[in-house]
Amino acid sequence: MDFTLTEEQIMIKKMARDFADNEILPYCQEWDAKDTFPYDTVKKLHDLGLMTIGVPAEYGGSGLDHLSQGIVVEEIARGDAGLATTLAASTLLAADPVYVAANDEQKKWFYGRMNEGDLAAFCLTEPGAGSDAGGLSTKCVKDGDDYILNGTKQFISNGGVAGLYTVFATLDKKLGYKGHCAFMVDRNTPGITIGPKEDKLGIRSSNTTQVIFEDVRVPSKNLLGKEGEGFKICMKTLDLSRAVVAAMAVGVAQGAFECAVKYSKERQQFGQPICRFQAIQFILADMAMQVETARLLYQKACALQDMGLPYTQMSSLAKCWAGDAAMKVATDAVQVYGGYGYSKEYPVEKYFRDAKIMQIFEGTAQIQRLVIANDILKE
Amino acid sequence: MKVLVCVKQTFDTEAKIELKDGKINDAGINLIINPYDEVAVEGAIQLKEKGIATEVVIVSAGADKAMDAIRTALAMGADRGILVKQDSAADEYARAVALADAIKKENPDLILAGHVAADDGSSQVPTRIAEILGLPHVNVITSIEIAGGKATCTSEADGGTAVTEVSIPAVISSQVSWNEPRYPSMKGIMQAKKKPVATVDAIAVENKVKVLEFALPAGKTAGIKIEEDPDVAAAQMADWMKNTVKVEVK
């Protein structure tokens, strides 16, 4: 068993980490406070090829293996989970349906736009269809050589900033999963409107909105796979991106952990740095265990993907454990800081707020446990 | 025009230096391109982007690990590398002899380097290389213009700047304020592995410097706090400077 990274992976990790140190960490508290989407920083990420890590090399992207994708997302999330959300939601989550199901012509169009700098958004969730992804109501109706989409998508990451959408809709709700279709949709298609930006607890530098489709005509050449394959494409996509969300959670945990270690060496109480107290040492040791186990799980899930081995259960284990770990570690980091941890002047309260979403989006901690249990019990 | 850049692999500037058995302990230390050399690499790549340089060659003298520094420079955009394998205990003289030998074989039009390494801070190697090769040398430059077989360099000087014109080939060493080194891009990183790196053995020469001992700087001691009226405080501080710190007044 070899836990070492390749030469490229080490270089990628260092580059992403340096980027986070110099271009993200000095500014992310301001983005958070002012609810700012950092366009300039996203542009810099694009110029470095980080916004196209999910675009295969043969289509002009960075074409990273899954483990390298995880490493990038972890390092960016260590800087700012909101920015990591923007990145992962675009080049991985929203582009994965294309990766999974698109033909060559579709890939050329979608990836070409991403290479030019367009962001993408994954439009699955609806006001009435969250964990119950199968229960979606957005309708698609075939009309000549087009499909007409009608419906509202909820909590869409990059909803207001994307130039491209991957959209899931149903031919007929009565058909259940078998009625689902997946489409690539250009933002400039008439009939698409963006709802107000969500005022969120954390990941505030990311753009989360409703996306509303009213009689939106999508050419049938934009249908991914066949009619009725939408649910399968969706599940494959979520399977693929789950380990990356785990990596994002690890980034949050790592960032909070580093802050806590540093602060514990600086903060003096009772005439000595608080890291000399066993009470603090035990918290730090617990944090280190959480971070490292979560990292091992996401990296194993990614490694399985790269080896072409089954990874569904491992991805869910990773996503669930890492989400919980991020929440626990960030909570502990606030505790190490004491009163200052509760203040916005210090960085850990932001990690604490950012961590919570890791237990919710892309399959809640409960849905993950369901997936894991189903996998254990299947016969 | 062929531009050659000398890079040294050094400890991460944030690394905690510790001694073990009387030597600097490098276990677990993160190694990077000397930040001053990184500026020289960026300068060379910019010359290439401007169409002035046609090829950027990276040369590093050191152990096998120095390959990582070369790969990083290749990922930034340099074209190929040369690793001159040399014992890590080589002194500035031995390094300069080894690098000069490799440079001579390449016959470049311009040789760039950082003016100092972040680890030993000796600031000797580029100057020694110029001396060995019999080339002009300009130090601590903050900008460069190349035209008509000449390099016009701006350098820092006391209280201002100095502009120096030299014929090329020349050895030119950079100040950090020359530019802001780029991050290697994803494409750069992917291509770096495919770019050629030659490995050669360094010329065997004896060090001229013998290290007798390594010692860490004395720990910072607590300052003193004088809480008196200004006239009393000034007298007490003068007394402290004279008798405790023993500041000599000439």
Image (cartoon, rainbow, N blue to C red):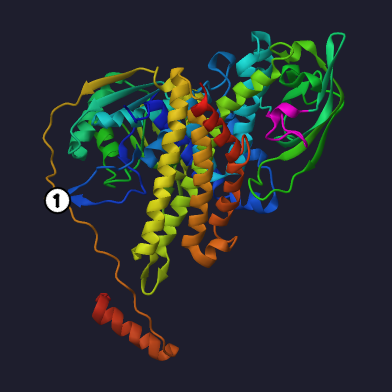
Expressed as whole percent of the image width and height from the top left, the position of residue A118 reads: 69, 27
Expressed as whole percent of the image width and height from the top left, the position of residue A43 reads: 63, 34
Asked whether A270 or A34 is in front, the reply is: A270
The image quarter containing residue B116 is top left
The region drawn magenta spans A119-136
Q: Is residue A148 toward the left or the right of residue A100 in the image?
A: right
Asked whether A215 or B24 is in front, the reply is: A215
Above or below, B213 relative to A233: below
In percent of the image, x 18 and y 40: which residue is there?
B91
The tally of labels here is 1
Q: Chain of mark 1?
A: B
Asked whether A340 or B11 is in front, the reply is: A340
Above or below, A168 relative to B155: above
Above or below, A176 relative to B208: above
Query: Callout 1: 10 Å neighbours few (<14), some, many (20+)?
Result: few
Can residue B77 be seen at all in this image of the molecule? no
Q: Quadrant of the N terminus of chain A?
A: top left
Asked whether A254 or B246 is in front, the reply is: A254
Above or below, A17 relative to B245: above
Can residue A67 be seen at all in this image of the molecule? yes
Expressed as whole percent of the image width and height from the top left, the position of residue B36 reads: 38, 41
Element marked by disc 1: loop
Expressed as whole percent of the image width and height from the top left, the position of residue B15 reads: 33, 48
Q: Is residue A130 toward the left or the right of residue A300 in the image?
A: right
Q: Circle 1 is placed at which residue position?
A: B22
Amino acid, disc 1: Gly
In percent of the image, x 57 and y 34: which residue is there?
A370
